[in-house]
Image (tube, rainbow, N blue to C red):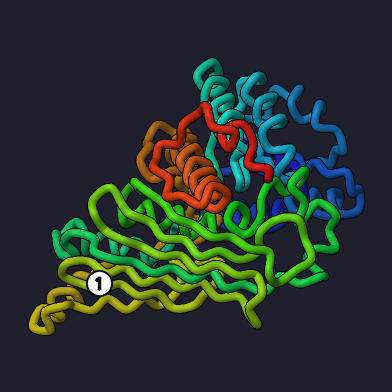
Amino acid sequence: MPDVAVIGGGIGGEHIKAYAELPDRFRVTAVCDVNRDLGQRLATQTGGRFTADIDDVLADPDIDIVDICLPPAMHVPVALRVLEADKHAIVEKPIAGSLVEADRLVAAEARSRGSVFPVFQYRYGKAFDQLAALRTAGFPGRPIAAAIETHWNRDRHYYANPWRGSWDHELGGAVLSHAIHAHDLLTQHFGAVAEIAAVLGTNANPVETEDCAAISFAMANGALATSSITLGAASDTTRMRLVYEHLTAESGTAPYAPGTDDWHFAARDLTRQAEIDAILQDVPDALAGFAGYFDAVADAIEGRPGREVTLADGLASIELVSAIYHSDRSGQRVSLPVDRSLPIAMSLRR
């Protein structure tokens, strides 16, 4: 069973709750945070030790996995050190602040005995297992069109944290830090993106980074998709509607764990609805959110890969963000993959 050190007690606290759901798969043996009170409290919850020193974590030969839950600008520097120590790195989103940084992680992983697992916990939950079962049965057919809404409420209290809303520290805005999960789900279930057109704005909050966006995607398989993003909504809702040749899959509005929501799967040919319903009723409940994500990581480390989020997935997420930012700033449609000679590949910063 791997020993885990969690670095950063903010979202790290949510990670720790998920590890506690998997007591036969992980031991959290260390918690690292500059906030002693927070770090010691979380360490007490896990039964592990507290430290305020990242060097202490990296030097510990018993730690197998370092879970990086730090502000975004620290993700790559710390992940590189974790890989140099031949440990696995779990890295909260965003995996990097540019394609060049993400490429450095790819090169470092190739040299290391450790692997990088980007955090995309939205992928896990019964609804997506249901969609997978329908796909296995050959039901959905080809993707046609999709619509995504990431409409959340982020106000002055959220941005009171000094690193939020800053290009230097958060590295990007709503596209990078919020809708990145929904866009990951889009590519998971609709295929690769071929071309993007995007318009971004800072309309809801007095911050540096974008908090609104309207994006259109042309998928490599010919399907089309749209993404509407705002951090100025009255509440937090995430909604997805995936239209396939033979069915439409529509989520509820659960903002942070759409896989746990009740989805509606409707046959285009009403006479086939009973076939869909029969497939769905045989899909068991599944671990969702962070617990589902960590369970997949454990499988991969134990030699049973296939369900985990890979560094290639993380790289693809940064490629997509880079294309969105470049489209907005250039006023042009942008094809993927992104040309590494473009300034946007060096830095997402405006």
Which residue appears at 85% of the width and 38% of the height? 51
Instruction: Say which quarter of the image contains residue 90.
Output: top right
Q: Position of residue 151 (x, y in %)?
A: 57, 73
User: Which quarter of the rendered picture does the C terminus lie within?
Assistant: top right
Q: Quadrant of the N terminus?
A: top right
The residue at which mark 1 appears reads as 280
Q: Closest to the observer: 332 or 116? A: 332
SS at badge 1: helix
Residue 243 picture location, percent across and down: 27, 69
**Residue 224: x and y, percent?**
31, 61
Question: Left or right: where does residue 36 sit relative to residue 217?
Answer: right
Quarter of the rendering containing residue 62: top right
- Residue positioned 47% across, 68% down in the render: 258
The reply, left or right, for residue 68 in relation to residue 114 is: right
Mark 1 crowd level (few <14, some 14–19, many ≥20, 10 Å Cα): some
State whether residue 25 appears in this view: no
Relative vertical location of residue 118 with respect to residue 175 in this rendering, above or below: above
